[in-house]
Image: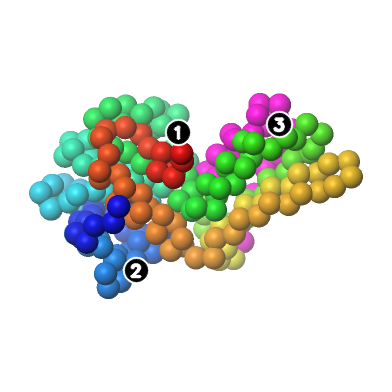
Amino acid sequence: MRTNKKINIGLSGASGRMGKAIKELVCKKNSGFSLLEEVPPLSGFEEWDKRKIQGVIDFSSPVLFDLAMRWCLLNDRPLVSGTTALNDKQKKNLKKAGRKIPVFYEENMSWGIWQIKQWIRTVSLQNYDLLLEDIHHKDKKDKPSGTALKLKKQFPVFARKKLKIMSFRKGREFGTHRIIFKGPQEQVLLEHRALSRQLFAAGALKALRWLIKQPPGVYSFEDMWGT
Ligand SMILES: NC(=O)c1ccc[n+]([C@@H]2O[C@H](COP(=O)([O-])OP(=O)(O)OC[C@H]3O[C@@H](n4cnc5c(N)ncnc54)[C@H](OP(=O)(O)O)[C@@H]3O)[C@@H](O)[C@H]2O)c1
């Protein structure tokens, strides 16, 4: 349920592409959010005032993600993170953090990719060859994308083994994922294309509005939108 109260946020990765997209949305009239603290500068976390911040949004790097999560744990505040390329230890720590604070994590904060994940789990694919293409701007650091890896995980094990991921980095592409199912006599093409970074920023803000009302745990859109 939407309330009229503004939510005060701390933003980790504020000077980056996603950080700027979040700031643009937060600055809009009636956004329902105010930006109170930001990192970088890296020293910012030490100066963040716990009393003012209701939740933290992080789109940064695996290194900064650790620091953002540490701040949230020390200060008992919810964390929404969309940072990709976390290693196994960080994913374990994320689960541990969920015992103490609400944590929301999604490799892709869009409604469209969430829908595609649902669909993949229900489709029957015995005789199809699978190709997943991930196309992003040239400065994206991880390859394949976190979304591509997450989409792959939705397939049953036998299909995962034959699914090939091809990553392309070019121009200013915000993020396109294309899955091609090639059967003996037909081909099915499923494509999601982000038309702006504000798509992901809006998803993260929605997630935070929902998350601040949840008890400690690790959450995703599955919990927010699922049945
Ligand atoms: N879940 C989703 O829907 C979604 C969507 C898009 C992107 N992403 C992910 O979000 C993350 C950020 O993407 P982006 O395109 O915004 O990246 P970006 O433009 O490179 O921005 C990264 C931000 O993090 C800061 N940062 C990173 N490491 C740091 C460190 N060690 N110390 C201090 N500051 C540090 C950068 O500061 P400086 O500017 O000072 O370097 C910058 O503010 C990536 O993991 C990306 O894959 C997720």
Residue 214 in the figure: left or right of residue 151: left
Q: Amino acid at mark 3?
A: Ala
Q: Residue at x 59, y 47 (%)?
A: 116
Residue 26 in the figure: left or right of residue 154: left
Query: How much space separates mark 1 and mark 3, taking CA atoms?
Result: 24 Å
Dot 3 or dot 2, earlier in sequence: 2
| Residue holding disc 2 | 24
| Image spot of residue 35 (x, y percent) | 23, 61
Magenta run includes residue 91: no
In the picture, residue 76 is in which quadrant? Answer: top left
Q: Residue at x 30, y 44 (%)?
A: 211
What is the crowding at mark 1: few (fewer than 14 residues within 10 Å), some, or many (at least 20)? few
Q: Amino acid at mark 1?
A: Asn
| Residue holding disc 1 | 87
Dot 1 or dot 3, earlier in sequence: 1
Q: Which residues are magenta?
A: 145-170
| Image spot of residue 137 (x, y percent) | 56, 60
Residue 159 tag number: 3
Residue 218 visible to the viewer = yes
